[in-house]
Amino acid sequence: MSFPKKPGGKALDVLQNLPRITLANLRPEPGARQTDKRRGRGQHGGNRSGRGHKGERQRGNRPRLGFEGGQTPFYLAIPKYGFNEGHSRRPQYHPLTLKRLQYLIDLGRVDPTQPIDLTQLVNARGVTIQPLKRDYGVQLVDEGADIFAAKINIEVQRATEGAIAAIERNGGVITTSFYDPISLDILIKPVPFFVRGQPIPKRMLPGEDMLPYYTSADNRGYLADPDKIQQARLALAQKYGYILPDISKDELYHMLAMRKDIRQIFFGLSPGWVVNMPEKKILKPTDEKLLKYYSS
Amino acid sequence: MAALFGSTVLRRAWLGPSSLCCRTPGAPVSAAGLRFVSNAVPEDNRSAIIESTEEYKYVERLIPPSRIPTPPKQTGPTPSGWIPPADSPPPLPYTIRRSRMHNIPIYTDVTNSNRKLTLIRKVEGDIWALEKDVRQYLQEVTGKELPTQVNEVTMTLKVKGHFDKELKDWLVSKGF
């Protein structure tokens, strides 16, 4: 059913039957315009003009904001503490709720039959990552864990325990992996990177402070032992009270078991390759030294 | 004397690099007291690079889509709470189109931290009938006569107060 739009609608019909509109015919609705209070013009705007009686108030000589008459003011009495110290050196992780992830899957913006990566999330315009603002990736938050019902293979940078439980309860796989800022920039915007014509760099390993997080099986780190991860999956299922579904008997097992190599940025593309987008070709090096460097 | 000699040596050293810059790259250096290897870049060894088109399908997966994908067909509400529009539009004198991202176009606004507004956009057809229905529905829900504003040029409806959840549920139940 299409409704032809009549520009102006009924107001235009009314207008065509009225006399010509001029400035003499127009008046604002009563009560629409309130006149401003003008000080110093008699009756209640006049006399002392709202300044009070004598003193600093009337004479406009009050001390600065925060001054407390000589008592040590609040903003000097409280000692300094480095709450925000080093804030520009702290890694930030954009939160992604399970509710939003479910919304993206339901609307077809994210494909659950392929491994979900940060590139897929950014292509679906589900999250916006700014690597220059110390963003190190995305963290999965368990708001919406009760409505989440999708079997996916997802890779994020951080995840809460509740989120891990919600994904595994539905038969999915979650991995947390580290991307250094340069790799993150390439991961988010692959097309401008391929246009540059540089070979895909290898992803750097996490630093000392993040290594324990990514080597522990409880966080499903990508550097952790697979056996320990399986044990952790069973332990989490017991803790949250659900039966861990067996993935190996699943038809999508091959897709769910897909994981990136430690030094790989994109699925299927190794470091050291150059992508030629206009000719749809990939150039691979054969030099020994290069191969040794990129596979180390 | 020694100072003059030193200054001429310095001046020649300064001029040396500038003349290098002016010359075409690849041309060997003559004087100026600087020594560098003037070999050109070694030729591209074509056989040292393998070209393949097999793995290009992985690159195609990474390219962001330029159009908003249409949601897959589903029966009833989804786990996230999104409800698709009805297949046939409801038999009403007005219709409310979905937004670009397939959502109901009802938005809330707050001005001066205390003035709440609900805005219904993308209305087509008889907007006054919609205004009457909205007023009647909100009268049943809240029990108050809420002021509304109709803009026939932009085909939008404003209602005082935040009623986005109620109005979204109401419109979805109508089938928009």
Image (cartoon, coloured by chain):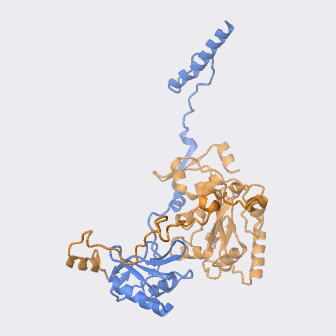
Chain colours: A orange, B blue
Residue A80 in the image: state x and y as whole percent: 77, 58
Pinpoint residue A148: horizontal percent, then vertical percent.
62, 79
Residue appearing at x 29%, y 75% in the figure: A8
The residue lying furthest to the top in this view is B1
Residue nearest the viewer, comparing A202 with A206: A206
Q: Is residue A270 visible?
A: no
Q: Quadrant of residue A99?
A: bottom right
Return the residue nearer the eye: B44 or A178. A178
Q: Quadrant of the C terminus of chain B?
A: bottom left
How many numbered discs?
0
Up the image or down, B52 lies above or below A159; here it is above
- Residue found 47% across the figure and 84% down from its top: B167
Residue A123 picture location, percent across and down: 53, 64
Q: Nearer the viewer, residue A126 or A44?
A: A44
Look at 57% across and 73% down and name the residue there: A112
Q: Position of residue A188 (x, y in %)?
A: 57, 58
Q: Relative to residue B32, is residue A285 depicted above or below? A: below
**Residue B53 drawn above or below residue A98:** above
Q: Is residue B78 above or below residue B57?
A: below
Along the viewing direction, whichever of A134 and A203 lies nearer the viewer: A134
Quarter of the image where one finds residue A243: bottom right
Q: Is residue A272 visible?
A: yes
Quarter of the image where the N terminus of chain B is located: top right
Task: Say whether residue B40 is left or right of residue A236.
Answer: left
Answer left or right for A187 relative to A11: right
Q: Is residue A226 left or right of residue A199?
A: right
